[in-house]
Each structure stands twice: as structure tokens, then as C-alpha cells.
């Protein structure tokens, strides 16, 4: 690709509407304006004093904080009721595993990273050391001079993680449930240590306003639970107030850059600014920060949440990050008597409804679709990181004053933000059998009695993260039988740097071992995929549902290849029709041969190959779930797991910075277009299968055997417009 085209695609990825803000920020950094506007180091005492109202006295900080608690989620007097409820929500064993041991291990110099694994950080922790790669970041330096993608320093998230203070939430929760545990003093010790190691603007911890917002939210939550404790003295509370001022000032100075990214950064930073504005009236700019944060938050939610409730970042986890931010901001605004606008809350309601379609109710898991950076903004329950019920339950209550799941440990977030009374609210279950047709974001769900599938068919208008068009996730009850490969890490060694973002890490077709899009620098992709939904027929409670769509990512190749996928649900069985067509206009077979690869990433289990060389079975809940593939002559089919050479095959990452082998069916072969592959997935040993022999050509209907009900055969033909016929 020539320089002119690379420049064009880079600017497209940034976004034409975001370009002025991005250019302005670049100029400010290059010309040293950022360093002059927000210089590193503590401001002089007299200047800092002018940022407070005239009668402010630091030694009166405990009084200000008691008043602040009246505008927070809970007051010190309410915490005894919270403690009683906590003992009812989670067993002592679960509590210790998820909450209690966080403090115990911190004292031993171990910190939980990305809600998953513990790393040695030392005591006291070295907050500017990457404990994953064992690298020290250079300090002191002005915050604007740090480069987040420095090859010598690897992944900046690995030094941000400790400084997010996510571990402060379990320390605070442990203090309320078990005051004798000593976690109040532990939090304040670590706050003091972070404060000592990170003077304003002179470490990488000040490089990102979103990190500052997350850190401030954690500080506030923990501090509020310790009010009245000897550890929360005037000096510490006054210093946290000063840090709140530094954080809000820093966010305000860089909010246009955050908005130029058109992602969750702007929403998080607006939430941080709005929080300071609502809770710190002793700061002279509090009202301004509240108004600006509120304005930016509502504008960005209108811009980033699509009309169907899906989210601009094409990611289930970033969808949760966005809603966690909104939950915090909207609840504080509600308590203050200044709720977010009805228009904003209505749009947030659509985003919640979209997410509820994707939550498997018995586990709380969702498809691991899109980027997953390990973020959990509000770790306020004993549920696993992969469980989305804590957010959904609390957000549903915020919007409707009812719960959407039966009571359980996922109610803890609801308890902290709304108090014990919210635990008595009625349950109004969300009907996941209703079809999900999210045309704006390109998400379609087919739900059966005990199964459901999600497929993506979208023409990107906002920056994509992964080359995964027409990827299919399939669930049988709580089992994510066909699944996404995840993300692993944003910066790591090849081949892993690219693999998890590539077409090869998804349940879709790969042509000539190429990605659907052309990879640009860092997070960017060039030549964004265009797609078209051809058919979607999913009547509620119907025995048959059908989706069909195609994408044009491979039209840059010879024969202008097009991938068309049809997904037919028959009760809880699924038939997937993959056709690779030529759009070059030539009649008959194309002149070129193309290598076609189809992958199905499977759930963990003992998958055994059947006598039929292209079918595998695994016992799930006592039934033999089956995946079988029919391919043209000459195609091979293998089950791969944990392969590293010559190229990665059979891997997944459910948590950031952690990867594990995952059984993956790979079907591969070469032929002239058109090419058809047929996959049948059933939750039991069933009879449904393509008619014997090689798959029919793409221009011919697919014959399906094993459907004996005449009405069901007619429904299949009607739903697929004759593309599939049960014979």
C-alpha cells in the first residue's frame, strides 16, 4: 500500500470529526504547550490555597468529608446495615477467596492484576515498575513525554494496573464486613506510598486521564468506608482532596484529546470531572467541572451508543466499562437531585437491553467479542470478572427500580450504590427469547429453547479492533460451545501481538491466509470491512430462525471473493452454510484457486473424533454435543489445541495477559470459487446433516436430512427462502 493510501486510511481510522482535536493535541505536545499549561510538580502552596473557597481549612477535612458522604452512595451511619447484608449475599469461603485474601496478599507484596492473577509487587509496591515484564519506567519525566507504545517498555497497562487502585474496593469492602481485618489502615498506607512516588505530572501514571478518573473513584469509595477510623485523619483526607483537584484539572486540560478518541476514555474522564464537581464544593472550580463533565458525558453517550444500544467500540467488555462509568455518574447525579437527562437515560436503557440479550443468566457470561483489556471499573461483588450480572442488576434498578435477575451475590453492586432497601425490589426477568436485531451495530441473535447464537454483520463507520466479520458465537445452556479467541495483550511479542486480533482467531472464513482487513500501525486497521445483511427471520418462540449475510473484505483479492454465511436454527440445532463466491462477474468456476480456512474454536472438554473424519463430540451436561463439517474433496479437517509453530492455532484468552490452549477445528483446502462448507452443531447426537456427498454448489439449495416433521420442513424452506430444503 502506497504512502498516500496509508495516510488516507490512517486519517479515516482517527475519524474526520475527531481530526481537529487530535491535530491540536499533537501540536500542543510537539510545541511544548502541554508542558507549560500543565507543568510537572506540585503547585506552590499559595497557588493551591487559591483553588479552595475562602473559609477552607485543611485541618477541618474530616468535617468536609462527613458532609461529602451525604452526597455519596452511603454514609458512615448506613454501613452497619450494609455489613449485615454482605454476610447474607456471599458465603465466608467465597468472600475470603474474592475479597479477604486481597489484603492478606498485599501485605506479602502480592497484588491481583486484571481481576485474575497475583503478581509480586514488593512491599511497599513500586508503582512505576512493570511487575509482569519486570521493567522500571523512567521517572521523573513530564507526563506528556511518555509513549504508550514504547517497544523497550512493553505494555503500559502493566504499570497502570496497580495504580488504578482496583484492589482498594476489596480492601474497603473487607473493612466494612470485617472491621478487625486492618484493611482501612492498609488502604491509607498504600495511598500515602502512591502519593509519595507520583508527584503530579512527573510519572507515567499521569499520562492518561482515564486512569486518573478510575483511581479517583477507587480512592473515594475506599475513603468513604473508613470515615471515623483513626487511619482516616485530617492530613490524609486533606491530601486526597488535593489529589482530586489535581485529577480534575488534568482531565479538564486534556478532555478534547479524550473526545478525539471517540471511545470510553472520554466517558470515563467526564465521569471523573463530574464526580469532583458534585462531591467537592470546597473547590472553586467544582461547579464548572460538574457542568463540563455532565455536558461531555451526555454528548459522548449520544455519540457513542448506537441507536440499537450497541457500542462504538465493538466490544462486550468496553460496553461494560461504559455502563459502569454511567452507573457511577448517574447515581451520584440522582443523589444530588440533578439526574442525567431523560434522553440520555433512555439511550443508556437501550445499551442495557442490548447487553441483557447477550448475558447467559446462569453464569453471567457474555460472548468475548471484541477487545478485552481486563478492565472492571466497579469490582463490587464476589462474582468472577466474566460475570456481567452485577452491572446489569444495578443498572436495571437505576433505570427501572426493579431487578432483572433473581437474588444472588451479583446483588452486591446494587447494595453499595443504592442501599439495603434495593435488595427487596421486585424481579422483572428479561426475555432473552426475543430476537436481537441490532442493525445499527450489526448484531443478530438466534435464540432456541436452550441455545442461542450471536453473529456479527456490519459495515464499519467507527474504528474496528479485530478482523472478525461474520464471527459466530454459539451457546448450549451455560456452555459457550463456539467462542471468540479474546484479546490477550495490547503489546507483546509476535506472533501473539497480531494473532488474537486476526481473522485466524475467530469463527469465520479466512481466504488465502489473509485477514479480512489490512493491518495498520498499533490498533489501526485499513480498508474497513463492508457487509450486508441479506435475511433475518427469527419469530419469537418459533422452532426455526435464519440469518444470512455477506462481507466484502476479500474483494481486494483475485476474483473479488465474497464470504456469505447462512445460520439456520432448528430448535436447538444449528446449520451453518459458508459460501465463498466470486464477485468478479465471470460465469462458472473462477480461474484462480484459493486456500479457504474455516475455524471453530470450541469450549474446553474431551472432544473425541467420530468415525466420520470431520465430526467431533463432547459430553456437556450429560449429552453428546456434536460439531460436524462437510467440505469439498481434498479439504482436511483437524482438531488443534495449543499449537505455536509454524503459526498459532487453538488458543484463547478469557482474561487480559493470560492465554490458554483451546480445542479448535480447522478445515482447510484449496479450490476454485465458488466453494461451500456446511457445519452442523447439535446439543445431542442428532440426525440432522447435509445430504450425502460433497456440499452442493453455492448456487444450489442445500439438502438437509434428518428433519421428519412436515411442518418443520416447510418452515425451514420458508425461513431460508428455499436456500435450505429438508428432504
Image (cartoon, grey):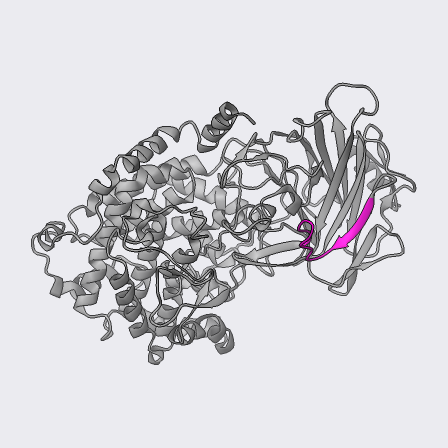
- Residue 669 lies left or right of residue 507; in this view the side is right
**Horizontal and vertical percent position of residue 472:** 67, 44
- Residue 441 lies left or right of residue 546; in this view the side is left
- Residue 515 lies left or right of residue 264; in this view the side is right
Q: Read off the magenta span.
A: 636-650
Seen in the picture, residue 699 relative to 320 is either above or below; the reply is above
Seen in the picture, residue 115 relative to 713 is either above or below; the reply is below
Q: Please state, as top left, top right, bottom left or bottom right, where the N terminus lies in the image.
A: top right
For the residue pair 177 and 565, the one nearer the viewer reads as 565
For the residue pair 492 and 209, the one nearer the viewer reads as 492
> Residue 241 sits in which quadrant?
bottom left
Which residue is most to the front? 152
Q: Is residue 75 visible?
A: no
Q: Residue at x 21, y 54 (%)?
A: 280
**Horizontal and vertical percent position of residue 451:** 70, 52
Q: Residue at x 36, y 37 (%)?
A: 259
Residue 676 painted magenta: no
Residue 649 painted magenta: yes
Q: Is residue 104 visible?
A: yes
**Horizontal and vertical percent position of residue 657:** 52, 57
Q: Residue at x 85, y 47 (%)?
A: 688
Which residue is most to the bottom? 180
Q: Please state, as top left, top right, bottom left or bottom right, where the C terminus lies in the image.
A: top right
Instruction: State the predominant SS element of the stretch in magenta.
Output: loop
**Horizontal and vertical percent position of residue 426:** 49, 59
Amino acid at each position: 500500500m502506497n504512502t498516500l493510501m496509508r495516510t488516507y486510511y490512517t486519517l479515516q481510522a482517527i475519524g474526520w470529526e475527531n481530526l481537529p482535536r487530535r491535530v491540536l493535541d499533537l501540536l500542543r505536545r510537539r510545541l511544548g504547550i502541554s508542558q507549560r499549561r500543565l507543568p510537572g510538580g506540585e503547585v506552590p502552596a499559595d497557588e493551591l490555597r487559591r483553588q479552595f473557597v475562602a473559609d477552607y481549612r485543611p485541618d477541618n477535612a474530616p468535617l468536609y468529608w462527613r458532609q461529602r458522604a451525604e452526597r455519596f452512595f452511603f454514609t458512615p451511619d448506613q454501613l452497619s446495615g450494609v455489613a449485615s447484608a454482605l454476610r447474607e449475599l456471599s458465603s465466608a469461603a467465597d468472600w475470603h477467596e474474592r475479597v479477604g485474601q486481597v489484603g492478606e496478599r498485599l501485605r506479602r507484596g502480592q497484588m491481583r492484576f486484571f481481576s485474575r492473577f497475583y503478581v509480586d509487587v514488593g512491599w511497599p509496591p513500586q508503582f512505576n515498575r512493570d511487575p509482569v515484564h519486570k521493567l522500571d519506567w523512567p521517572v521523573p519525566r513530564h507526563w506528556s513525554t511518555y509513549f504508550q507504545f514504547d517497544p523497550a517498555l512493553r505494555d503500559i497497562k502493566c504499570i497502570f494496573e496497580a495504580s488504578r487502585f482496583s484492589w482498594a474496593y476489596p480492601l474497603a469492602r473487607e473493612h466494612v464486613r470485617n472491621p478487625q481485618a486492618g484493611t482501612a489502615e492498609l488502604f491509607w498506607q498504600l495511598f500515602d506510598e502512591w502519593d509519595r512516588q507520583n508527584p503530579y505530572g512527573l510519572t507515567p501514571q499521569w499520562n492518561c486521564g482515564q486512569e486518573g478518573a478510575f483511581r479517583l473513584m477507587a480512592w473515594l469509595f475506599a475513603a468513604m468506608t473508613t470515615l471515623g477510623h483513626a487511619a482516616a485523619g485530617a492530613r490524609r483526607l486533606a491530601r486526597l482532596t488535593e489529589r482530586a483537584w489535581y485529577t480534575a484539572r488534568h482531565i479538564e486540560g486534556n478532555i478534547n484529546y479524550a473526545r478525539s478518541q471517540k471511545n470510553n476514555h472520554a466517558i470515563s474522564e467526564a465521569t471523573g470531572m463530574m464526580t469532583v464537581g458534585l462531591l467537592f464544593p470546597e473547590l472553586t472550580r467544582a461547579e464548572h467541572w460538574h457542568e463540563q463533565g455532565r455536558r461531555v458525558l451526555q454528548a459522548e453517550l449520544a455519540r457513542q451508543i448506537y441507536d440499537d444500544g450497541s457500542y462504538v467500540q465493538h466490544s462486550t467488555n468496553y460496553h461494560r466499562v461504559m455502563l459502569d462509568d454511567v452507573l457511577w455518574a448517574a447515581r451520584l447525579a440522582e443523589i444530588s437531585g440533578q439526574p442525567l437527562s431523560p434522553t440520555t437515560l433512555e439511550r443508556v436503557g437501550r445499551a442495557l437491553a442490548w447487553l441483557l440479550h447477550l448475558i447467559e443468566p446462569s453464569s453471567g457470561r457474555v460472548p468475548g467479542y471484541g477487545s478485552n483489556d481486563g478492565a472492571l471499573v466497579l469490582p463490587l461483588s464476589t462474582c468472577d470478572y466474566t460475570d456481567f450480572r452485577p452491572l446489569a442488576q444495578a443498572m436495571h434498578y437505576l433505570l427501572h427500580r426493579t431487578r432483572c435477575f433473581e437474588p444472588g451475590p451479583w446483588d452486591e453492586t446494587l447494595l453499595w450504590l443504592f442501599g439495603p432497601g434495593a435488595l427487596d425490589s421486585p424481579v422483572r426477568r428479561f426475555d432473552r427469547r426475543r430476537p436481537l436485531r441490532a442493525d445499527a451495530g450489526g448484531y443478530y441473535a438466534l435464540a432456541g429453547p436452550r441455545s442461542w447464537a450471536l453473529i456479527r454483520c456490519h459495515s464499519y463507520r467507527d474504528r474496528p479492533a479485530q478482523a472478525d466479520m461474520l464471527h459466530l458465537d454459539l451457546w448450549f445452556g451455560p456452555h459457550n460451545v463456539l467462542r471468540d479467541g479474546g484479546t490477550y495483550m495490547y503489546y507483546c511479542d509476535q506472533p501473539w501481538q497480531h494473532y488474537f486480533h486476526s481473522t485466524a482467531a475467530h469463527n469465520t472464513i479466512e481466504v488465502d491466509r489473509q485477514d479480512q482487513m489490512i493491518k495498520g500501525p498499533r490498533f489501526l486497521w485499513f480498508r474497513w470491512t463492508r457487509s450486508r445483511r441479506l435475511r433475518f427471520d427469527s419469530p419469537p418462540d418459533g422452532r426455526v430462525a435464519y440469518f444470512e449475510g455477506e462481507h466484502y473484505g476479500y474483494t481486494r483479492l483475485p476474483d473479488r471473493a465474497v464470504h456469505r454465511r447462512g445460520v439456520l436454527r432448528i430448535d436447538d440445532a444449528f446449520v451453518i452454510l459458508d459460501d465463498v463466491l466470486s464477485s468478479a462477474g465471470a460465469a462458472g468456476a473462477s480461474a484462480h484457486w484459493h486456500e479457504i480456512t474455516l475455524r471453530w474454536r470450541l469450549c474446553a472438554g474431551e472432544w473425541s473424533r467420530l468415525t466420520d473424519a470431520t465430526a467431533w463430540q463432547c459430553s456437556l451436561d450429560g449429552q453428546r454435543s456434536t460439531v460436524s463439517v462437510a467440505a469439498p474433496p481434498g479439504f482436511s479437517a483437524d482438531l488443534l489445541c495449543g499449537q505455536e509453530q509454524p503459526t498459532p492455532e487453538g488458543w484463547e484468552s478469557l482474561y487480559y495477559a493470560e492465554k490458554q490452549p483451546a480445542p479448535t477445528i480447522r478445515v482447510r483446502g484449496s479450490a476454485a470459487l465458488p466453494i461451500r462448507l456446511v457445519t452442523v452443531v447439535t446439543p445431542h447426537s442428532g440426525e440432522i446433516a447435509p445430504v450425502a456427498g460433497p456440499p452442493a454448489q453455492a448456487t444450489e439449495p442445500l439438502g438437509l436430512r434428518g428433519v421428519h416433521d412436515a411442518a418443520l420442513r416447510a418452515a425451514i424452506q420458508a425461513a431460508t427462502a428455499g436456500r435450505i430444503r429438508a428432504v
